[in-house]
């Protein structure tokens, strides 16, 4: 049997990149010898993260619509045309049997070009509210892999497969104990620990809320693991310098299995990858959705858990006044913590990567 050749397109944030990498690894496990090529956006984090996993990646000169500075969009039509032309050339050179789109700037031009060349395409929609690009692409896609129910409001019902969101093996196979996790971060093995994460790029509102209330929070006799993202790292480190034994500050945490193991409560944005990981980790979580995500999909993601009593939520606009109060309330309610932990675990899907990989193999015609 000839080797399978697959392009995986997309990126921009860890929420797109890490699922793409997980699907790539799953394809190579299920079909050894599979040839993979990733396509991302130049100057985005996938250009660094994907090669670290041993995969080849090519970059497109593509960006999204800039709502803050309208004048910066003057070159956008040219970039869209050029990225599609470059995508066509990449596809012609690589000759894939199938193309997977995981979202992000590079996903649309590559899938759009591939569909025009009659190559089977698969969309991996991570969120509970689909964006315009994936809705357009779904018309000619062979399959749409989703993580939430009732997605037929966005996509053709016959193309939808409920697979969940792919998560790194270090999370799905996580066996760290709480004590191991706390030891990894140099923390007390007994004290309650709060993990604060704002996604791979950080979250300004969460960071500022924790910064302002850190002294009051520490009165609860807790300790904190705080992933700030690069933009807030120096400020967060300076803020915590007088509490270095109880507050550990990082710009990015690669060893999230240790972080989840150490945590008793998590404060997080509501990106699809974060939610998939938290379902597996089974930790009580307070979501602060990023309000400017496309179609406000993070709020939809969070509400899918809140309605099942699997999480709490604070609006971004209310975080500075209500987040600390919500954290304190949860800290002192062990019964609620246990119920949330049980409910969020019920939503976990550990083999999403292989479910998607099997569908990629199927649509390629090489199964």
Image (cartoon, rainbow, N blue to C red):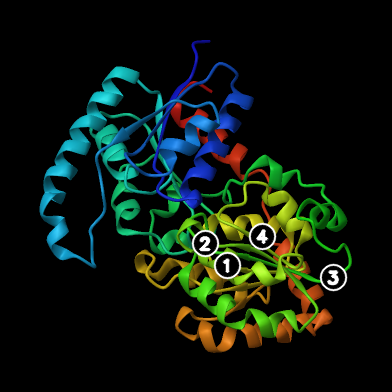
Q: Nearer the viewer, residue 338 or 260?
A: 260
Instruction: State the SS at label 3.
Output: loop
**Which of label 4 and label 3 is nearer to you?**
3
- Residue under pointer 2: 234
Identify which residue is drawn at 53% across, 59% down. 199
- Residue under pointer 3: 191
Instruction: State the SS at label 4.
Output: helix
Q: Nearer the viewer, residue 45 or 58?
A: 45
Q: Residues within 10 Å of mark 3 (few under 14, many from 20)?
A: some
Between marks 1 and 2, how big is the CA–CA gap?
Answer: 6 Å
Between marks 4 and 3, how big is the CA–CA gap?
Answer: 21 Å
Percent of width and height locating residue 222: 78, 75
Answer whether labels 4 and 2 touch (C-beta < 8 Å): no
Relative vertical location of residue 97 with respect to residue 283 in this rendering, above or below: above
Identify which residue is drawn at 68% across, 40% down. 169
Answer whether labels 1 and 2 touch (C-beta < 8 Å): yes
Instruction: State the SS at label 2.
Output: helix
Q: Earlier in the sequence, mark 3 or mark 2?
A: 3
Answer whether labels 3 and 1 touch (C-beta < 8 Å): no
Identify which residue is drawn at 32% across, 34% down. 59
- Residue under pointer 4: 278
């Amino acid at each position: 049997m000839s080797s399978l050749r697959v392009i995986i397109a997309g990126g921009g944030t860890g929420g797109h990149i890490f699922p793409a990498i997980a699907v790539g690894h799953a394809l190579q496990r299920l079909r050894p010898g599979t040839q993979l090529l990733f396509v991302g956006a130049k100057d985005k984090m996938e250009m660094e993260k994907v090669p670290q996993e041993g995969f080849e990646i090519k970059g497109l000169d593509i960006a999204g619509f800039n709502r803050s500075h309208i004048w910066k969009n003057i070159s956008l039509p040219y970039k869209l045309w050029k990225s599609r032309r470059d995508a066509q050339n990449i596809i012609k050179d690589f000759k894939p049997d199938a193309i997977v789109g995981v979202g992000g700037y590079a996903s649309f031009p590559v899938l759009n070009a591939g569909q025009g060349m009659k190559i089977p395409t698969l969309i991996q929609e991570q969120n509970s509210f689909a964006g315009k690009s994936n809705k357009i692409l779904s018309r000619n896609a062979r399959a749409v892999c989703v993580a939430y129910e009732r997605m037929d409001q966005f996509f053709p019902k016959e193309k939808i497969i409920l697979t969940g969101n792919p998560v790194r093996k270090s999370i799905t196979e996580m066996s760290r104990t709480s004590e191991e996790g706390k030891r990894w971060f140099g923390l007390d093995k007994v004290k309650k620990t709060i993990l604060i994460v704002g996604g791979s790029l950080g979250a300004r509102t969460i960071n500022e809320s924790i910064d302002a209330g850190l002294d009051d929070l520490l009165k609860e006799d807790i300790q904190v693991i705080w992933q700030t993202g690069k933009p807030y790292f120096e400020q967060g480190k300076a803020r915590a310098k007088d509490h270095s034994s109880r507050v550990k500050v990082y710009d990015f945490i690669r060893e999230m299995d240790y972080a989840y193991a150490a945590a008793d409560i998590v404060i997080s944005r509501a990106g699809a990858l974060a939610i998939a990981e938290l379902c597996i980790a089974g930790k009580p979580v307070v979501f602060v959705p990023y309000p400017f995500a496309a179609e406000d999909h993070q709020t939809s993601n969070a509400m899918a858990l809140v309605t099942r009593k699997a999480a709490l939520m604070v609006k971004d606009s209310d975080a500075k006044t209500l987040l600390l109060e919500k954290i304190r309330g949860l800290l002192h309610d062990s019964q609620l913590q246990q119920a949330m932990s049980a409910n969020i675990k019920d939503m976990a899907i550990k083999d999403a990567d292989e479910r998607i990989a099997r569908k990629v193999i199927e649509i390629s015609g090489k199964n």
